[in-house]
Image (cartoon, rainbow, N blue to C red):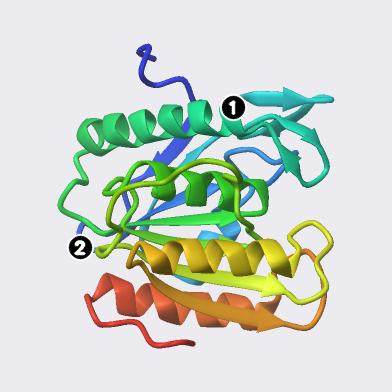
Amino acid sequence: MSAIDPHPHIFTPGHPESPVLLLLHGTGGDEHDLLPLAAQLSPGSGTLAPRGAVQEAGMNRWFRRIREGVFDVDDVVRRSGDLAAFIEWATTFYEFRDRPLIAVGFSNGANIALATTLLHPGILPAVVAFCGMHPLDGITLRGDLDTVSVALFNGDADPMAPQASVDQLAAVLQSRRATVSRNLRPGGHGIRPSEVTAAAEWIRRRAIGKSEQSP
C-alpha cells in the first residue's frame, strides 16, 4: 500500500449505481465488523471498510483517548486528516467518485466520521452515527456544511455518549448548516433493530437524492 493508504481495508464494489458505505468500526473491532450491518442497511451497495490504526491495550481504535470519554483532541485532528486522505485515495483508486458515499460508524467509528466531517468539509457528504458524541471539544471549527447530512442514533442513558455531548454535537453541526436527523431511544450503548430500520430508510432516501425527514 502507498504512504497515503495506511489502513488495511476491504472494498466490495456492489452494484455500480448503488452508494458506497464507508464502514467505521468501534473500539476493538476491525474491517469485518460492520459488513453484516451494511448488508441490512443497504443491500447491494458497495462497502469500504478500513481498520483503525491506533492500538489501545491490543484493541483497534481510530484515535487515542486519555480515559473513557476524554479524547486526545490533537490525535483526533491528526487521525481525521489520515482518514480524509485515505478516502480521497480510495475514491480514486476504486473509481467510485460519481457514487454517493455514506459513512456508517459505531461508537469510536462514529466519532472519527463526525470529526472528519467537521474538520474536512466536502469529504463525507453523509454520515450515519450510531452512539457518537462531540469529538472535538476546544477546537475552533470553520467551513460551511450545507451539503452535509448527518443522522444521529443514540440511547438516552448511554454513559459512553452522554446526551450533553450529543446535544453539543447537534448544535455545532446545525450552526454550520448541516442537515441533522436526531433519533433518540431508551437505553444505552449499542445498535437496536429499530435503529437499523430507520437508518436503512435514511440511507435509501439519501441515495436517491431526496430531502431527509426525521425517521
Q: Quadrant of the N terminus?
A: top left
Circle nearer the N terminus (1, 2): 2
Which residue is pictured at 44% across the width and 73% down the height? 180
- In front of the other: 132 or 178: 178
Q: In the figure, is residue 50 to the left or right of 207?
A: right
x and y percent of residue 59 in the render?
A: 77, 31
- In front of the other: 151 or 49: 151
Q: Residues within 10 Å of mark 1 (few under 14, many from 20)?
A: some
Which residue is pictured at 50% across the width and 57% down the height? 104
Which residue is pictured at 40% across the width and 66% down the height? 175
Label 1 and label 2: CA atoms lie apart by 36 Å
* Kind of residue at badge 1: Asp
Residue beneath label 1, please?
Answer: 75
Label 2 element class: loop
Residue beneath label 2, please?
Answer: 17
Q: In the figure, is residue 64 to the left or right of 50?
A: right
Identify whether 30 is placed above or below 21: above
The reply to whether residue 212 is in sight is yes
The reply to whether residue 52 is in sight is no
x and y percent of residue 7 in the render?
A: 49, 26
The furthest residue to the top: 3
